[in-house]
Image (cartoon, coloured by chain):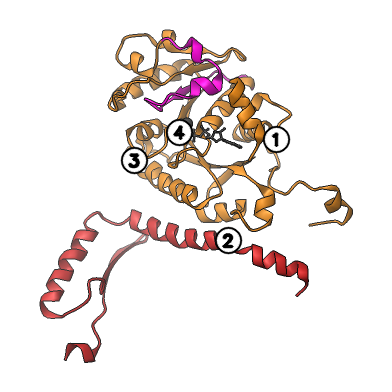
């Protein structure tokens, strides 16, 4: 059975698109045919992060309106032939996406793909609503910061009341926490909420911690999802996340301050 | 307290303050999420009725809705003004 994953947060700029690109690539690299859809109508960006911006001909809205077929609009990724990207439309018409239209496209994708990753726009308006409405799993991207945590909780409320699964009294959406832009050294200094703090507040299953990392900007500069940068901390964090999602048991990393020589010598806890 | 402890505790404050504020806020927002949508209107109308008879403050009344497996309770709280003020 195909599974629809929404990557959502409420708050903007927390790392949803970075995460969508990374996990979609990760799932495809593990041998699962995966599609990643940009729901940010009017502010298309996933194409840039995936490095396929020059190959966009048709978009999501074209397919909904019957101006192109799904196969015409899907772009095959240059690094992995099991990964396809469905770009957002740059139209300024907010009503370009309809629930019925989105539902139809997802149904069609489900026949052919194992995972469908929906990159949600920020906010709780129509685009964000449609991105999460049909989801089976939700990846809640949160930064260790008050407004992001609050918005994540708000989004949890919406997932549990306004989604298709909620409306039809089906088994609820599975929710996972992805704590991103984490700085263990700042947590240690008491300047940043810790992963335990955030988990205690949101009581969500932690899928992984993504450290604040320079490699993310490098990856977006070149248009390659950061998970392909296997040496980088953020890339490894996303690889762990994909593995855990697929059922592998991997210990959490990037939570503790890098143990320097000093720490090792003096047996710091 | 050693010097090291001093630095640790003085710096631990901003994240723990954030945590405390979030815990209160999230608990509050979660409880109001499950409330029936008529609650604010009910509260407003109740206040109007009560103010016909008693001169209470705008925020003197609170309506709480609670839900568990077996029952739903609606709790109404009115803080009456001090005696001195009513006479
Ligand atoms: N782990 C990280 N370390 C450092 N920078 C990061 C990390 N994750 C994301 N960023 C940076 O944060 C910015 C926002 O990331 P991204 O576009 O993925 O967020 P978003 O949630 O999709 O934003 P929007 O709400 O606008 O769609 C980008 O500049 C990105 O490079
Ligand atoms: Mg985005």
Marked residue chain, label 3 = A
**Rendered residue at 76%/46% (across/down):** A258
As drawn, the chain in orange is A
Residue toward you, B11 or B16: B11
Do the CB atoms of the residues marked 1 and 4 lie less than 8 Å apart?
no
Front position among marks 4 and 3: 3
Front position among marks 3 and 2: 2
Q: Which residues are magenta?
A: A30-57
**Residue behind mark 3:** A162
**Residue behind mark 2:** B14
- Percent across and percent down for residue A79 are 62, 14
**Residue behind mark 1:** A233
Residue A225 in view, yes or no: no
Disc 2 packing (10 Å; few <14; some 14–19; many ≥20) = some
Marks 3 and 1, Cα distance to the nearest angstrom? 36 Å
**Rendered residue at 40%/31% (across/down):** A131
């Amino acid at each position: 059975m195909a599974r629809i994953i929404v990557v959502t947060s409420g708050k903007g700029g927390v790392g949803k698109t970075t995460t969508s690109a990374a996990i979609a690539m990760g799932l495809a690299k593990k041998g699962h045919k995966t599609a990643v859809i940009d729901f940010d109508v009017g502010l298309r960006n996933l194409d840039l992060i995936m490095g396929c911006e020059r190959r966009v001909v048709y978009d999501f809205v074209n397919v909904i309106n019957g101006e192109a077929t799904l196969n015409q609009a899907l772009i095959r990724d240059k690094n992995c032939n099991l990964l396809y990207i469905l770009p957002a439309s740059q139209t300024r018409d907010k009503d370009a996406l309809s629930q019925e239209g989105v539902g139809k496209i997802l149904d069609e994708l489900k026949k052919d793909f194992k995972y469908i990753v929906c990159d949600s726009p920020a906010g709780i308006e129509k685009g964000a609503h449609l991105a999460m409405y049909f989801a089976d799993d939700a990846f809640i991207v949160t930064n260790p910061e008050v407004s992001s945590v609050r918005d994540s909780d708000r989004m949890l409320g919406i997932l549990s009341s306004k989604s298709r699964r909620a409306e039809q009294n089906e088994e609820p959406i599975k929710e996972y926490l992805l704590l991103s832009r984490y700085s263990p050294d700042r947590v240690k200094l008491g300047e940043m909420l810790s992963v335990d703090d955030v988990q205690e507040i949101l009581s969500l299953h932690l899928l992984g911690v993504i450290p604040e990392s320079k490699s993310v900007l490098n990856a977006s500069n070149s248009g390659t999802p950061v998970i392909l940068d296997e040496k980088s901390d953020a890339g490894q964090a996303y690889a762990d996340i994909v593995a855990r999602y697929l059922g592998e048991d991997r210990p959490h990393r990037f939570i503790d301050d890098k143990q320097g020589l000093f720490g090792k010598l003096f047996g710091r806890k | 307290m050693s010097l090291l402890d001093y630095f640790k505790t003085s710096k631990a404050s901003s994240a723990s303050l954030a945590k405390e504020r979030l815990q209160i806020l999230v608990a509050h927002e979660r409880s109001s999420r499950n409330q029936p949508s008529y609650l604010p209107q009910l509260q407003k109308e109740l206040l109007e009725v009560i103010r016909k008879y008693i001169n209470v403050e705008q925020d003197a009344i609170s309506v709480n809705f609670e839900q568990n497996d077996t029952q739903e309770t609606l709790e109404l709280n009115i803080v009456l003004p001090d005696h001195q003020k009513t006479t």
